[in-house]
Every structure is written in structure tokens, then in C-alpha cells.
Image (spheres, rainbow, N blue to C red):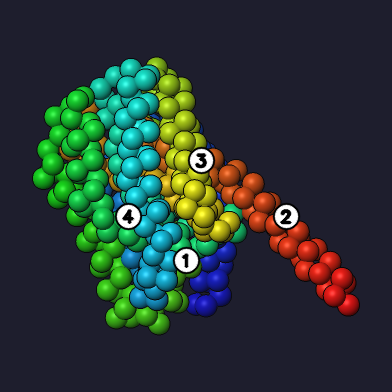
Amino acid sequence: MDTVLKKIGKISNFASRYIGIIIIAFSCLAFFWQDGFAWMTNYTSIFLGVIMFGMGLTIRLADFKAIFSRPKEVLIGAIAQYTIMPCVAWALCKLMHLPDDLALGVILVGCCPGGTASNVITYIAGGDVALSVGMTIVSTLAAPLMTPCLVYVLAGAWVEVSFFAMVLSVVKVILIPVLLGILLRTLAKDHVDKVSDVMPLISVVAIVMIIGGIVAINAEKILSCGLLVLVVVAIHNFCGMMLGLLAAKLFGVEYSRTTAIAIEVGMQNSGLAVSLAAANFAANPLATLPGAIFSVWHNIAGSIFASFRRAGAEKAKCQNAASVSTVKIENA
């Protein structure tokens, strides 16, 4: 049994690292084999609930210490998350005169909490993973209030938004699954630890199914406006990471934590955006498209950003090591 779990764990690590490529591959398959994926849209909320339950299972009570041991950075990340991304989304919708459906979808993405993929990308970047986890926890737990409020205020100019219906949706697909996951881990820690390496694989499968379903039912619309959405999504994601980086630097945050904040701000829980669009805005079918494309793009862009930040971290270490050696020689 342990051997099987180890093999699955290796597959899980591979899938987490190359999630962007996997999503692209299955999105292409869904585009050409629509009947094989279209049915998945009926279970979008369930798939997202599974992802968030898996996130809850990975949260240890010790992880909450990161929130209290790094209050300054967590606060910067949380404020940046719910100001930079929503405001950039709104500005892009206005500047590019997006149609109502697409504007709603872009704003939904901008108003969502940080995604769990940010923790993986932060790890690859050599950033402060504990801080990343702490920021994801805070923004996720704040989502039932912050996301509906921001969508209500920012998207109201384009479509009618039901605030309480959105609150209920976020509570169902995020808060309850996460809390259940945390509870189960607390009660059955040893048993959960045995299968913890499997959970990322389940999350990857669920994300792929969410996006595959959206691509399948929107294939024709992707042909007509997919490029426009990709451009908006790419700018949105880039601005989020760069402005998150700038905010952290302005407050004097050190390198690894700056990396974590930038990635956390730029990488959204786009699966939630897709789920909210499907559940609350059925009359605006294209609203699911920005979330689906963002899910693909932010993993690719995040991985590229991570490679630059890791290279910068390694260069800084070499310079510090050289400085220490020089000081020792001079003192000798």
C-alpha cells in the first residue's frame, strides 16, 4: 500500500509542477471533443468543493502560526489581494470596452481570493511557502464577505448582481469544504498524512475537469473572442504580480516573502470565478470564459515568474556567501 501511495505521490508532484501544460493539453482535447467534456459543467461546484476540501486537508493548525508570526506580510498580501486585482479588473473592463458577459467574468476573477496553485508556484520560486499558505487561508476565509461585496460594487454597472445569492454560493463551495477539511485533518491527522501526497493530484484532476467542461461548451465563443480574453487575462495577471511585488517592496519586505506576496496577489482562485459565474449568472454564459482562461494562463505565467525569482534568490545567496568569505579573509 505504501509503495502504491509513493507512486501516486510522484505522479501528484509531477501533475502539480506541470499543471499549466496539462490544462492546455486537456483544453485542446475538450475543444475538439466537446461531447466528451461538456457534461462536466453540471458538476462545476462539486469539483470546486473537492478542491477546497483538499486544501482544507493540507492545512495544519501550525499553519495558522504563519499568520501571527508574519502579521505585516499577511496583512499586506490580504489588502493587496482585495484591492489590486479587483481594481485592475475594473480598469481593464472600462479601458477595453468589454462586452457585459466578459466584463463580469473578468471582475469575478479579480474579486476572488488567492488560489491554492500559488502555494506550489511559491515553492518552485523559492519563496516563503508558509507565508503563501497563510495568505491563502486568510483570503479564502474572507472570501464569503469580500468577494460578493466587491462583485456587487464593481460589476453592478454591467449586470444585476444578487449579493446574498453570491454569499451563499461562496459559503457552499469554499468555506464549508475548507472547514470540513481542516476538521477532518485535526481529528484524523495520522490517517490524513498517509494520503496527503494524493490530494494535489485530485485537485489537478478537478481543475482540469472544470476547465475542460467550460472550454467544451464555449468552443465557438472561444474562437470569436478567446484572443481578446487571453490578452485581458495576461495583462490582469501581469499587473497583479508586478503591483503585488511593488507593494511588498515599498513596505520593506525581504526577498522570499516579496516573492510569496507577488505570486499570491497575481494568482487567483479562478475556479471559484467559473463556479460563481455558472451558478449566479446563467444569463451571461460568456462570464465563465475569463476564469477558465485565467486558470490556464496564471499557471504558465506564474511558473515563468517563479523561475526568475528563484534565479534571483540563488544569485543573492551567492553574493552573500562571497561577501561573508571576503569579510573572513579581511579579518584573518
Compared across the picture, whether 162 is left or right of 221 comes to: left
Residue with the mark numbered 1: 130
Disc 1 marks a residue whose amino acid type is Ala
- Crowd tier of the residue under label 4, counting other residues whose Cα lies within 10 Å: few below 14, some 14–19, many 20 or above: many
Question: In the image, what residue occupies the spot 31% across and 30% down?
Answer: 90
Could you tell me which secondary element the residue under label 2 belongs to?
helix
Q: Earlier in the sequence, mark 3 or mark 4?
A: 4
Distance CA(mark 1)–CA(mark 2): 22 Å
Closer to the camera, 310 or 277? 310
Could you tell me which secondary element the residue under label 4 belongs to?
helix
Residue with the mark numbered 4: 139
Numbered disc in front, either 4 or 2: 2
Q: Earlier in the sequence, mark 3 or mark 1?
A: 1
Disc 3 marks a residue whose amino acid type is Met
Proximity of marks 3 and 1: CB atoms separated by less than 8 Å = no
Distance CA(mark 4)–CA(mark 2): 32 Å
Question: In the image, what residue occupies the spot 37% across and 47% down?
Answer: 81
Question: In the image, what residue occupies the spot 52% across and 50% down?
Answer: 249
Numbered disc in front, either 3 or 1: 3
Name the disc covering residue 315, or none: 2
Residue 6 image point, x, y percent: 55, 71
Residue 119 image point, x, y percent: 47, 57
Disc 4 marks a residue whose amino acid type is Ser
Quarter the C terminus occupies: bottom right
Residue 150 image point, x, y percent: 23, 40
- Res 238 visible: yes
Q: Earlier in the sequence, mark 1 or mark 4?
A: 1
- Crowd tier of the residue under label 3, counting other residues whose Cα lies within 10 Å: few below 14, some 14–19, many 20 or above: some
Name the disc covering residue 60, or none: none
Proximity of marks 4 and 2: CB atoms separated by less than 8 Å = no
